Image (cartoon, helix red, strand yellow):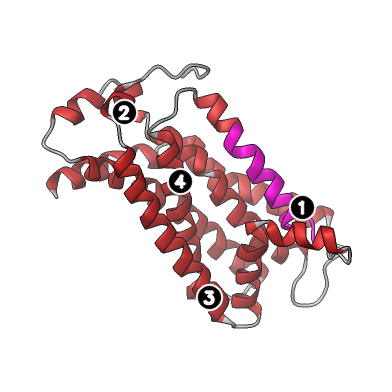
Amino acid sequence: MNGFKALFYSNLKRRLVDGFALGYNIVFPIILILLLGTLCRSSGSGVINAYSYYVITIIPFCITMGIVTAAYSCKDDAYANTAARILFAPVTETAIVCSKVLSVTVAIGGASMLVYLGASLLYRIPIRSMVILFLILLSFFTCAIGCLVGFGMKNFMVVKNIMTVPIGILATIGGTFISYSVSNTTLRSLKEFSPFTYLNRAMFYSIYEQEQMKIGLVCTGLLLGGILIILLAIRKFRKEEFEDGKLSGYEK
């Protein structure tokens, strides 16, 4: 337990001073919300205006893009030449994996929660406790996937591009950047295929309809899915990969 605590606080300290990680989950969503909200402000009306819409859709998108941060965090120790010392220390593979996942979850989840609370106060969006829980669990699920990939990645830039491209495509299909309805059966099926459709829908129902069932089911799925992915990451953990600090295609 002491080994886990030491690794957790060490990893968390790195994430809290990581300008890229915090900037991507604080500065980047704020810029997107302001930019898209301004460009589309004439399309919104009533309770949900353009700014409110993008607060709800952009934050989950930025959280899922944090998969890159989570993947790279798994190479921090190798890149800093401290991985060997960790492996020789009395810590388990479970402690190494869990400390990585939870530290990045705290950083990304905390940053996203601050953006949600600040934007909600600014644009008078109802604040729901279930939405806060949802953002934390989405961060947990995303970081679990990122760490699973990160512990076995060879080339950081290739992995980064492979992960970010489909996320952007699915987000676009799911209505993250533009609100649209489709009557075409094929397009409707394509939209329903995007996980962002369900993530965004759950947030809208929770905030404006006070319907917590949908977001509760999503939270349960994210929690269970994240735990299963962590167990898989522990099982797939390889010491030689953890020590490999040669990040081809990436320069510090």
Residues rendered magenta in the picture: 162-179
Q: Identify the residue at image location x=13%, y=47%.
A: 2
Instruction: Mark 2 vs mark 1: give the one in front.
Output: 2
Q: Which residue is mark 3?
A: 128
User: Mark 3 near mark 1, Cβ–Cβ under 8 Å?
Assistant: no
- Which numbered circle lies on residue 167? none
Q: CA distance from mark 3 to mark 1?
A: 24 Å
First in residue order: circle 4 vs circle 3: 3
* Residue 48 higher or lower than 91, as above or below: below
User: Mark 3 near mark 2, Cβ–Cβ under 8 Å?
Assistant: no
Q: Which residue is mark 1?
A: 36
* Residue 100 at least partly seen: no
First in residue order: circle 3 vs circle 2: 3
Q: Position of residue 130 (x, y in %)?
A: 49, 73
The kind of residue on which mark 2 rests is Phe
Q: Quadrant of residue 95?
A: top left
- Which numbered circle lies on residue 242? 2
Q: Residues within 10 Å of mark 4 (few under 14, many from 20)?
A: many
Q: Identify the residue at image location x=41%, y=41%.
A: 148
Q: Which residue is mark 4?
A: 145
Q: Quadrant of residue 176?
A: bottom right
Q: Nearer the viewer, residue 9 or 176?
A: 176
Whether residue 165 appears in magenta in the rendering, the answer is: yes
Q: CA distance from mark 3 to mark 2?
A: 39 Å
Q: Residues within 10 Å of mark 1 (few under 14, many from 20)?
A: some
Q: CA distance from mark 4 to mark 1?
A: 29 Å
Q: Position of residue 155 (x, y in %)?
A: 49, 22
Q: Residue furthest bottom?
A: 210
User: Mark 4 near mark 3, Cβ–Cβ under 8 Å?
Assistant: no
Q: Position of residue 52 (x, y in %)?
A: 70, 66
Q: Main secondary structure of the magenta part?
A: helix
